[in-house]
Amino acid sequence: GFEERRRLMLGHGRVGRGYAGRVLQLITGATGLDDWEWGVTLLAKDTIDIKAIVYEMRFDEVSARYAEFGDFYIGMQLPLDVLFRRICL
């Protein structure tokens, strides 16, 4: 019941807090606005930190038992000169 859910969500939150300072998490509610009742936006300077938190959270107990995952999108924000250097233009 409620206590079990509370315990599971506390563990899930503990995983997220382990990434404090490396990953900013924005949790948004979307009930009735799209296919999902909430969304998570992750921001980080290094995409490896996003990969790490998603992987760890995906396999924590609450996610493994109850979560349904939609699409994942990732993007990078760079000054144009840095972008052109990265793609060798």
Image (spheres, rainbow, N blue to C red):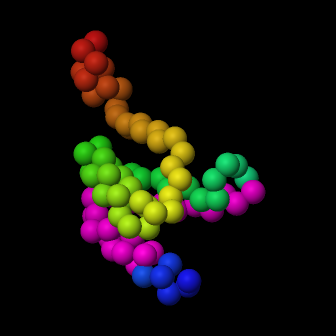
State the image quarter where residue 59 is shown.
bottom left
Left or right side of 3 for 46? left
The quadrant in which the C terminus is found is: top left
Q: Is residue 53 visible?
A: no
**Image position, residue 27 (x, y; %):** 52, 62
Q: Residue at x 24, y 15 (%)?
A: 88
At horizontal 28% and vertical 63% (from top left) the residue drawn is: 19
Residues 30 and 76: in front is 30
Residue drawn at x 37%, y 37% as measured from the top left: 76
Q: Where is residue 63 in the image (x, y as percent from the top left)?
A: 44, 61
Q: Can you give x and y, in whole percent of width and height, for residue 77 in the image?
A: 38, 37
Taking the view exactly as shown, the residue that stands out farthest to the right is 32
Q: Give the range drawn in magenta.
A: 8-32
At a point 42% along the width and 60% down the height, the residue shown is: 64
Q: Nearer the viewer, residue 24 or 1?
A: 1
Q: Does the magenta stretch include residue 48?
A: no
Residue 4's place in the image compared with 44, above or below, is: below
Q: Is residue 27 above or below residue 77?
A: below
Q: Does the magenta stretch include residue 26?
A: yes
Q: Is residue 29 left or right of residue 59?
A: right
Tell me the quarter of the image containing the N terminus: bottom right
Percent of width and height locating residue 4? 48, 82
Q: In this view, does 19 lie to the left or right of 7?
A: left
- Whether residue 36 is visible, yes or no, is yes
Q: Which of 24 and 89 lies nearest the eye of the viewer?
A: 24
